[in-house]
Image (tube, rainbow, N blue to C red):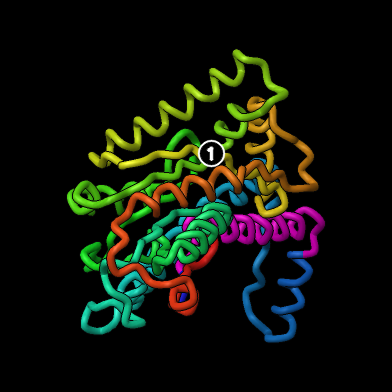
């Protein structure tokens, strides 16, 4: 079972409710609603007949607005309840007795935990996990939104945290995960990958020096805010340029991201997606990180490639 996005569910439900309210208002305005009611009354001989009031634009707008809010709250509530159910039933990478699956030794397993919205950071996490396996380690990829309640880091020799930035901050799921496991993370080898559009601007060769410096300062500020709020001190940090996935956004988010992209100097053609991730730099960073880990008990590449890599949904 996969968790749902509360925001996305709210938007979908709110849109459906708004369309229904708009459709009803249109029927009332054209007199079709009264005709349908009259037909129903005649068919079933209901008395007395029901007479609709005169159409008023303000009433129709109020009905549409109220329906939108009710739909959004309904979708939001449904997604939250569903995610609670998923969280209780999902065991992630744990087996029934809390031990590592696939017979892997704790000294050879690296955790890659991530949070995502449109699935970009999940793709980055999977790329990181594959690189870790090539280095001879096993890798578990876990969505922070699906972490079981009693999840423990004791079985892992290292952890890489990957999170994207939205509206000036990292995802709440990853913030909550790091806060709850800060003590464990501070005792082990760790790395933090902060995925953002600002990093793409700081790496843009077409941007002016002032623009690149401003973007780099924004990236540092967001990373510092994350570190300070979670009380975690990552061993290594790498800002990663993300992507603008216009084709996967809803209408409202597409407009918002177009404005943000224009301000950042990124592409604004909403009919296509823009990818800015430097995969080579990311791969080199992961290689350097795994090289710093203790090599005792490391699996050979053939064995590592056969190990399970638990992966979660895109979001």
Nearest the viewer among 102 and 107 is 107
Would residue 149 be seen by someone viewing this image from the given angle? no
Question: Residue 98, located in which quarter of the rendered image?
Answer: bottom left
Reading the image, the residue beneath label 1 is: 196
At a point 19% along the width and 50% down the height, the residue shown is 187
Q: Which residue does the image show at 40% across and 64% down from the upper left? A: 142
Residue 140 sits inside the magenta stretch: no
Q: Position of residue 304 (x, y in %)?
A: 44, 73
Which of the pair 213/221 is nearer the observer?
213
Q: Secondary structure at mark 1?
A: strand
Considering the whole magenta stretch, tell me its main secondary structure: helix
Q: Is residue 18 magenta?
A: yes
Q: Is residue 51 visible?
A: yes
Q: In x, y percent, where is residue 193? A: 44, 44
Residue 88: quadrant of the picture: bottom left
Q: Position of residue 14 (x, y in %)?
A: 57, 56
Asked if residue 157 lies left or right of residue 42, the reply is left
Where is residue 21 drawn, in percent x and y? 65, 57
Q: Is residue 145 above or below residue 235?
A: below
Q: Is residue 13 left or right of residue 32?
A: left
Q: Against 126, is 207 above or below?
A: above
Towards the viewer: 129 or 201: 129
Highlighted magenta segment, given as a residue range: 3-32
Q: Is residue 2 left or right of residue 20?
A: left
- Looking at this view, is 281 or 310 the one in front? 281
Q: Quadrant of residue 33?
A: bottom right
Residue positioned 28% across, 50% down in the render: 189
Residue at (74, 57) in percent of width and height? 28
């Amino acid at each position: 079972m996969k968790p749902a996005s509360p925001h996305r569910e709210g938007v979908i439900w709110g849109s459906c409710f708004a369309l229904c309210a708009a459709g009803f208002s249109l029927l009332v305005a054209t007199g079709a609603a009264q005709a349908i009611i009259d037909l129903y009354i005649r068919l079933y001989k209901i008395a007395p007949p029901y007479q609709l009031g005169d159409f008023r634009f303000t009433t129709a707008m109020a009905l549409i607005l109220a329906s939108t809010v009710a739909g959004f709250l309904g979708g939001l509530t449904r997604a939250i309840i569903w995610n609670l159910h998923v969280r209780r039933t999902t065991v992630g990478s744990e087996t029934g007795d809390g031990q590592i699956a696939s017979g892997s030794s704790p000294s050879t397993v690296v955790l890659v935990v991530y949070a995502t919205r449109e699935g970009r950071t999940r793709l980055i996490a999977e790329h990181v996990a594959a690189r870790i396996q090539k280095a001879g380690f096993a890798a578990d990829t876990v969505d922070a939104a699906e972490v079981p309640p009693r999840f423990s880091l004791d079985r892992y020799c290292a952890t890489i945290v990957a999170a994207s930035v939205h509206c000036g901050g990292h995802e709440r799921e990853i913030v909550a995960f790091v806060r709850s496991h800060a003590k464990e993370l501070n005792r082990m080898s760790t790395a933090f990958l902060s995925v953002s559009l600002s990093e793409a601007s700081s790496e843009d060769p077409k941007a002016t020096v002032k623009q690149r410096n401003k973007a780099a300062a924004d990236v540092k500020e967001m990373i510092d805010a994350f570190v300070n709020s979670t009380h975690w001190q990552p061993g290594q940090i790498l800002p990663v340029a993300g992507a603008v996935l216009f084709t996967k956004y809803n209408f409202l988010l597409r407009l918002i991201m177009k404005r943000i992209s224009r301000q950042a100097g990124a592409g604004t053609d909403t009919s296509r997606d823009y990818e800015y991730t430097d995969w080579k730099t990311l791969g080199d960073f992961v290689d350097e990180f795994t090289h710093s880990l203790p090599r005792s008990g490391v699996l050979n590449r053939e064995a590592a490639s056969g190990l399970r890599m638990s992966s979660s949904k895109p979001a």
